[in-house]
Image: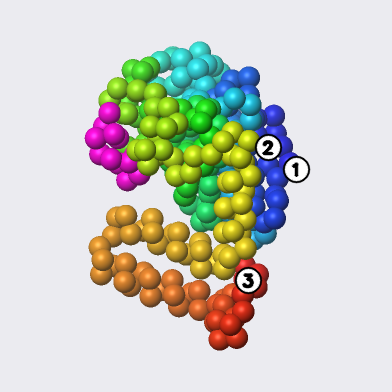
Amino acid sequence: MSQKDHYLFEVKDNVGVVTFNRPDRLNAVNWELATDLVELFRALRHRDEVRAIVLTGSGRAFCSGGDAEWLSGSGDRGIPGLSEKTLARYQRKTPAGPFAEFARMIIEVDKPVIAAIHGPAMGAGLAYALACDRRFADKTARMCAAMVRLGFAPDCGITWLLPRITRLSTALRMVETGDILEAEECYREGLIDVLVEEDQLLPSAMEYARKLAKGPSVAVDLARRFVFKGLTSTFDEMLDYEAVAATMSAHTEDAREGTMAFVEKRKPDFKGR
């Protein structure tokens, strides 16, 4: 296991487990944590032994959103409009900085990412959960697009993610009111894919992640990539993209193993190559 003060990381059965680790702050994200998570996920994109990722939180929360000190503008780093501190050039161009960048990296890590949600997933934490491929949660889970409760417009990709995952009316309700949705309602609205008992949360998420990790991971990653591509492409464009993906995956060892196993009527033994 490797760790910093504010996150934990370990690899189990080709699954990378990333844990927000600020339990005393309900895993609220500050600038330093967001920066470190961006760097971690950028590195994980190139670690072939990690074929799937589980994102979870320690203690009583998944992630309660942006840290209050950061949001108030009272910390060491300024926030546009709320402090007089000098802003770095990068932050002037991208006010949300690594907070939004981490939501992007969950998708761009180019590997399946599964959220295991216990307790609050709010604000930026909601965005990170929504950016994952699937969301497993227990009955303590609560979701909220909390930005409006503090007078902020939504950020971190929430307005792109929400209407693609839940109903348009639910997405609008969440970003306009900041209502907190409890686990059962989240499940009914499609924000949670699998709702389990508290003691089954991480085992259930890990079981699914291991299933993906044991598969033909190049083909899995390409399929994931092109599903996201399809959200902003035409049907004709996707036919071309899929042809490229099929050609790329056909050159893998797993494609040869999969076709031979089919002919020989046996279970394939994929290696992720």
Which amino acid, by three-letter code, is at mark 3?
Answer: Phe
The answer to whether residue 166 of the structure is visible from this angle is yes
Q: Quadrant of the C terminus?
A: bottom right
Task: Give the distance between the C-alpha atoms of the residues marked 1 and 3, in whole angstroms.
Answer: 26 Å
| Residue behind mark 1 | 1
Apparent side of residue 87 relative to residue 165 in the rendered image (left or right): right
Which amino acid, by three-letter code, is at mark 1?
Answer: Met
For marks 2 and 1, the one nearer the N-term is: 1
- Secondary structure mostly seen in magenta is helix
| Residue behind mark 2 | 8
Q: Is residue 227 above or below residue 91?
A: below
The region drawn magenta spans 162-173
The secondary structure type at the circle numbered 1 is loop
Verify CB contact (< 8 Å) between mark 2 and mark 1: yes
Camera-side residue of 185 and 26: 185
| Residue behind mark 3 | 270
Q: Is residue 27 above or below residue 260?
A: above
Q: Quadrant of the N terminus?
A: top right
